[in-house]
Amino acid sequence: MRFQLALALLAVVGSARAEELTIALRVQAEGFQPATIAAPAGARIRLEVSNETATPIEFESFELNRERVVPAGQKATVYLSGLSAGSYEFFDDFNQKRRGVLTVE
Amino acid sequence: MLETLLITWRETLEAALVVGILLTYVARSGQRRALRYVWLGSAAAVVAALICASASGGAMALLGGETQEVVQALIVFGAVGVLSWMIVWMHRSSHSIQGNLHRQADSALATGRLIGLAAIAFVAVFREGVETMLFLWGVVVQRGMQLATMPLVGAGLVGAGLAVATAWLFFRGFSFLSLRTFFRTTGVLLLLVAAGLLTSGVNKLIGLGYLPPLVPQVWNTSWLVRDGSPLGALLGALVGYRSRPSLLEVLAFAFYFPPMLWALNHAETATRAAGLGDESARPAA
């Protein structure tokens, strides 16, 4: 009962999503493609991370306070909103040579 | 190689600490039989994590990445519920152990509580286990199944072993505490772990776009403790530390305590009342 209630609540909150800006971010063996992405301050961002490598990756950013495991060949959407101007670094926690920056202005 | 070791150390630490708290608690309160349940829950989680990690391309993909994440968040919330319930009864039974009342009755834990212990150990190990396995699996696939890969996998396993050692050292320090202080300390630690778990579930739902962060970054303490540092990892594992939390996460953490403190206080007075009732009932009978 409580479980269904929680699901219903999630659905309601989920449907109230605002206008979104979608940014595609591909993860390839050499690194993030593109390694630098940009967005306006305050926007609601859908960051679509597609893992094009043969192994799982973990999109992680201390500065954005996000982490998400993406299995090989799959795509995951990471939501960001209300960011103030600045640059936010992100990396693949499973292969930390892969790094990138989100510039918000 | 050092990177591999550090990653598995970080991933395994949280699970090791939670299982460590449960084991020390159960051992010190003399409920030896319950130890087996904690180990059983942990072992089952390792097996389940192995299965999930190896099936992540096939069966798990059918579920869809986002559904998986939502399910994980719901499991975390479920774990917070079970953990909170356990904190309350642990608090109650620690009182009776200290007062030497009901010792017999308490030494045989009810089945529900044993399953609760196993469930918490399971969730703690499973959560981190899947990630660790996926990571190590990735290392093997990336380098190929060859002799040169083995040191890397070895480093990963050493990292996991070191996490268990870290947790063990952490709890060695506890053995010098008196029973009273010990129960107090583990009680407070478990409350912080539960609040941290709740916060991490909320963080997941924010990342999935189901909850608004309200304010994306309330403060920034990365100058004091960096998220990736060993101290940051330890605090992250224990209390869900993040250097740049959103307002919703801070609120979730803060609002966990008032109802729990009320429930603990209530449990304490109820135990006292029951204890007195017993004492006065005995001579009459």
Image (cartoon, helix red, strand yellow):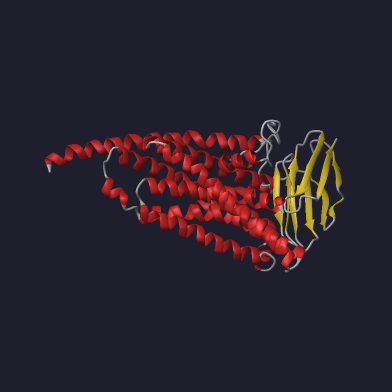
Q: With B234 as the anchor, is B36 left or right in this view? A: left
Q: Nearer the viewer, residue B84 or A35?
A: A35
Q: With B140 as the anchor, is B241 left or right in this view? A: left
Query: Is residue A7 in sight in this rendering?
Result: no
- Residue B171: x and y, percent? 48, 43
Q: With B215 as the anchor, is B177 left or right in this view? A: left
**Picture quarter with the N terminus of chain B:** bottom right
- Residue A28: x and y, percent? 83, 57
Q: Is residue B71 above or below residue B203?
A: below
Q: Residue at x 69, y 57 (%)?
A: B135
Q: Nearer the viewer, residue B249 or B212?
A: B249
Count of labels shown? 0
Image quadrant assignment for residue B114 = bottom left
Image quadrant assignment for residue B217 = top right
Q: Nearer the viewer, residue A13 or A32?
A: A32
Q: Residue at x 38, y 36 (%)?
A: B178
- Residue B194: x and y, percent? 52, 43
Query: Is residue B31 in sight in this rendering?
Result: yes
Q: Residue furthest left?
A: B284
Image quadrant assignment for residue A69 = bottom right
Q: Is residue B234 above or below residue B122?
A: above
Q: Residue at x 49, y 52 (%)?
A: B120
**Picture quarter with the C terminus of chain B:** top left
Q: Residue at x 21, y 40 (%)?
A: B278
- Residue A98: x and y, percent? 80, 51
